[in-house]
Amino acid sequence: MSQLNMYQTVVNDILRYPDDKPTIGLLLLKGKNKTLVEYSLTRYQNPISVAEWKN
């Protein structure tokens, strides 16, 4: 289990209310020459969309 997934599980178990939607984990890292994005969708059943984003 990744660290991001572990934090997401803690949020779901401790902070999430019963009527909240499933938690998603999103990690954004910006380096000198690149940007890294990681996501985690624990227990998420629905399809997701991914799009290019330019700043």
Image (cartoon, rainbow, N blue to C red):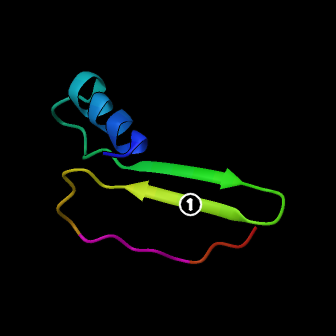
Return the x and y of residue 4 as percentages of the image width and height: 42, 43
The quarter of the rendered structure image containing the C terminus is bottom right
Q: Is residue 34 left or right of residue 41?
A: right
Q: How many marks?
A: 1
Looking at the image, which residue sits at the far front?
1
Secondary structure mostly seen in magenta is: loop
Q: Is residue 35 above or below residue 26?
A: below
Q: Secondary structure at mark 1?
A: strand
**Could you tell me which residue is drawn at 26 percent across and 30 percent down?**
16
Return the x and y of residue 30 as percentages of the image width and height: 73, 54
| Residue underneath mark 1 | 37
For badge 1, the amino acid type reads: Val
**Could you tell me which residue is drawn at 25 percent across and 33 percent down?**
12
Q: Is residue 27 left or right of residue 42?
A: right
Q: Is residue 18 above or below residue 28?
A: above
Q: Is residue 1 above or below residue 36?
A: above
Camera-nearest residue between 2 and 28: 2
Q: Is residue 48 magenta?
A: yes
Return the x and y of residue 36 as percentages of the image width and height: 62, 61
Q: Is residue 28 magenta?
A: no
Tell me where residue 15 sits by quadrant. top left
Looking at the image, which residue sits at the far top?
14
Q: Is residue 33 left or right of residue 41?
A: right
Bin the neighbour count of mark 1 within 10 Å (Cα to Cα): few under 14, some 14-19, many 20 and up: few
Camera-nearest residue between 29 and 20: 29
Looking at the image, which residue sits at the far bottom?
52
**Could you tell me which residue is drawn at 82 percent across and 65 percent down?**
33
Q: Is residue 45 above or below residue 48?
A: above
Highlighted range, magenta:
47-51
The quarter of the rendered structure image containing the N terminus is top left
**Could you tell me which residue is drawn at 32 percent across and 30 percent down?**
11
